[in-house]
Amino acid sequence: MTVKNKWLYFKKHIYLKNGCIAVFFRIVLLCIVADDLYAQYQYPFQNPDLSEEERIDNLLSLMTLDEKVNCLSTDPSVPRLGVKGTMHVEGLHGLAMGGPSNWGRRNPAPTTIFPQAIGLAESWDRNVMQQVASVEGYEVRYMFQNEKYKRGGLVVRAPNADLGRDPRWGRTEECYGEDAWFNAQMVVSFIKGLQGNHPKYWLTASLMKHFLANSNENGRNNTSSDFSERLWREYYSYPFYRGVTEGGSRAYMAAYNSYNGIPCTVHPMLKNITVDEWGQNGIICTDGGAYRLLVSAHKYYPDLYHAAEGCLKAGINQFLDNYKEGVYGALANGYIRESDIDSALKGTFRVMIKLGLLDPPEMVPYNKIGVTDTIEPWLTEKHRKTALEVTRKTIVLLKNDKQLLPLNTRKISSIAVIGPLADSVLLDWYSGTPPYKVTPLDGIRNKVGKNAKVLFSVDNRFNKAVEIARESDVAVVVVGNHPTGNDDWEKCPVPSDGKEAVDRKVIILEQEELIKRVYEANPNTIVVLISSFPFAINWTKEHIPAIVHMTHCSQETGNALADVLFGDYNPAGRLVQTWPESEKQLKPMMDYDITHGRTYMYFKEKPLFEFGYGLSYSSFEYTGLRISNRTLTADGQISVSVDIKNTGNIAGDEVVQLYIRHLNSKIQRPDIELKGFERVNIKQGEVRTVEIPLKASDLAYWDENKHEFIVEKDKIMIMIGTSSRNIKFTEVIKIN
């Protein structure tokens, strides 16, 4: 019987009328309870029957000042008291315990690696996001708890909830695209996958990054992202907001940049909004080195002592930096008190409790991972199969004239596979090391076997690419960016490349010259663009009959690509960014006001490919648009239904997209906004009814005078389509 149950038993079964006897028995009872507590737990903070806040208060009361300062790092362990905290790991598209950045340090280990984050988003599938994060979360626990490894951490720095407002951003690969509402859906799904569905404990803790408006690399250490309060609420913070309030994340990383002149690391928004309004009561950490940049780059404080004060009072409770000198200096000078550190550490220990690290091991179901299962999960058929299925779902068919795709192995005797990315699977800065890698060349060879001759050339030196293209039935040219470029942190080898710390100078594809030479030799040319961001491939779009887009890093890149090229999988990925025709269509990089013409919502010119675009080997017919109610109340919800028939020759997925437009709003609204989507599989000849909910709360705007979201009385146009520029049906309803 637990202490709590014993107490309830005595309260229920011992009824004492005499006051003296009651006092005596209460003293005896307290002694019994205290003795039992001491026998079972050395300290009250170890007792899971106590409230979370009682446990944390007790733990802090037992810690020395030095122990508290140590716990402001990303390792909140207190060995003297038997507290084993957990550190952070990277995990944008699989646990990173290796890769180009050597996240495993001296002992890198393989893990299941999926397509880059923006590629995952191109699946337009919430289940995919949750599935990937669940696999990753399991491997994180395994790595942390398995006797062979015993390393890593349970706080996962993912997802990246920033928005890809400009395709020149070097870290576009890390985000889920340009639409805040869509990104929020993906963010919430990924968080739920990482944290699991147990009512009390988390599988891992999801730490979102980078708060806020961090989408320029050049000058990120001291630049300011400037825009209105309304855009702050409706656009830049929205995925973070939903990540906290709906996804349940209780951790995030502050960004390097400033917002409206105040560094994000010490901005009042951390406490005033995310904590006080949203209920974010866990970890708020700096980015790597951001604390010292407050003095050296932003020049916001005169010294590190004041910078430490600013961080702690703003809400920071974990430093990814050398911070101790500054914290001790702030204490010595009276800028902060020990109570300020106590207040900060409460958030960290709340997360530790949710991870089960302060509870008896037998109480935490996730503690069995890596202990009772001795097969390394990244070697299992289940995780390999998941990687393949997910990668297939992320592939986007951009063009398919004359039905060149899918290829028929019975009609092809020779294939030329050409290009710098044809025989490689490139990893990015936040990738781990996969247990194996299947390149595009490997995948094609595996697919055709002995039925066709496969010729290969990495480039056109000595005219080899042209020669093998000329003598083959079809040519597959695999091109794209290099996600790390080279070993120089601040440079990329070509202007169109970008990465962390480096924004792209241009969005053209230098490798289009290779595509042109191959096409001249063989008009049956297929271009596979493996890229972290959009490219202005105008010539390729105009001339090449078939174009496929996918992103880097997946261990199953080649097999998934071959399945699509040869028709074993019908592609249904969709773009999550506007692909411009040229840089001329883009606004200045530091213009963060998207209403000036950024994203599909405000983009006035014709793009190369629009947001939501993607093709299929099937054709789909839309009929029977139905709306459950033509009046939407301010706190209500309606459903929008449409019938979709697969009129093609094979089964396939269709991504049904719901957009809206405000017709009589008193304020500036986007020209078009995504407010619903559903990816559905439809068999050949089958008709499926797709129902998408539309909430009035998703139509609200931020009133800068009242400082709250307002659902405006208005008429809105509901649009159902296959992309932001291919609308099939429209209907008008009222909001009352």
Image (cartoon, rainbow, N blue to C red):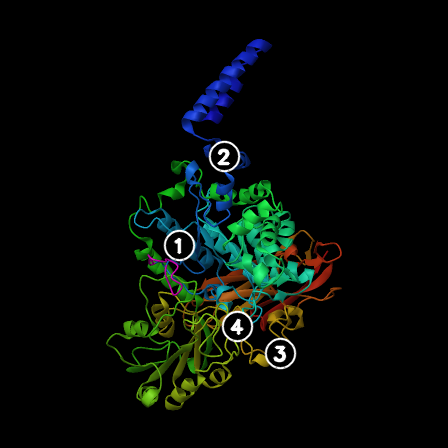
Q: Which residue is mark 1?
A: 135
Of labels 1 and 4, earlier in sequence is 1
Mark 4 neighbour density, 10 Å: few (under 14) some (14–19) many (20 or more): many
Q: Is residue 246 visible?
A: no
Q: Please state which amino acid type lies under the numbered disc 4.
A: Asp
Answer whether residue 472 is magenta in the image: no
Of residues 400 and 38, which is closer to you in this image? 38
Task: Tell me which corner region of the image, top left, top right, bottom left or bottom right, holds residue 583.
Answer: bottom right
Q: Name the side, left or right, on which 543 lies relative to 641.
A: left
Of residues 325 and 115, which is closer to you in this image? 325
Q: Residue furthest left?
A: 450
Q: Nearer the viewer, mark 4 or mark 2?
A: 2
Q: Which residue is mark 2?
A: 62
Task: Tell me which corner region of the image, top left, top right, bottom left or bottom right, holds residue 581.
Answer: bottom right
**Stretch of the chain drawn in magenta:** 98-110
Q: Please state which amino acid type lies under the numbered disc 1.
A: Val
